[in-house]
Image (cartoon, rainbow, N blue to C red):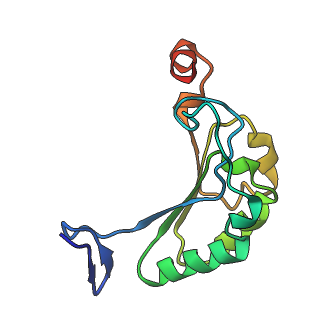
Amino acid sequence: MQPSVTSKGPADAFGRPLLNLRISVTDRCNLRCRYCIPEEEYGWLPREKLLSFEEISELAGIFTEVGIEKVRLTGGEPLLRKDLPVLVRMLAQNPRIRDLALTTNGVLLPMLSSANSAVSRLIKNHSSNHDARYNDFAG
């Protein structure tokens, strides 16, 4: 089945509206768990291959024009992306984004303080908790 586009915006194969957009701002991570980086030798994308903040903002704008209401910034670890608060502020200027969220392992949260008022939600990835289960998971 092919996804459909209704008069209200894009929908999945079952007719459910697609309202959420996840944008990976980097493939890099500051933790070495098997979840994100399972390979022994991992090749990072060259920085010039990453979308610029302007490109990300433009893409988010296009998606919101067709009905996307929620944007979640992810990674790797998105807080490793240089000047991430600049992107957060750019996206926060889009009035069609009702919910701007960031998924993080939480290690670098103090870095976000300059833009946290623009982020609706911070989603701390529970697999980054330093407990016995995480240590088993991360190796």
Q: Nearer the viewer, residue 121 or 135?
A: 135
Whole-percent x, y for residue 25 in the image = 65, 58
Seen in the picture, residue 1 relative to 74 is either above or below; the reply is below
Residue 119 found in image quarter: bottom right
Of 118 and 136, the residue lying toward us? 136
Q: Residue at x 56, y 74 (%)?
A: 60
Q: Quadrant of the N terminus?
A: bottom left
Q: Is residue 66 left or right of residue 50?
A: left
The residue positioned farthest toward the front in the image shown: 41
50 or 9: nearer the viewer: 50
**Residue in view at x 74 percent, y 41 percent:** 109
Does any portion of residue 95 appear in the rendered image? no
Q: Is residue 97 visible?
A: yes
For the C terminus, the image quarter is: top right
Q: Can you say whether 127 is above or below 45 in the image?
A: above
Answer with left or right where residue 98 lies relative to residue 2: right
- Where residue 98 sits in the image (x, y, percent)? 52, 68
Give the vertical position of 138 relative to 84 (above or below): above
Q: Residue at x 78, y 66 (%)?
A: 86
**Farthest top residue in view:** 132
Residue 14 at what x, y percent from top left? 18, 66
The answer to whether residue 110 is left or right of residue 98 is right
User: Which residue corresponds to the image point at 63% horizontal and 37% vertical from the top-left?
Assistant: 105
How many numbered marks have been drawn onto this rendered protein structure? 0
- Give coordinates of residue 108: x percent, y percent: 76, 39
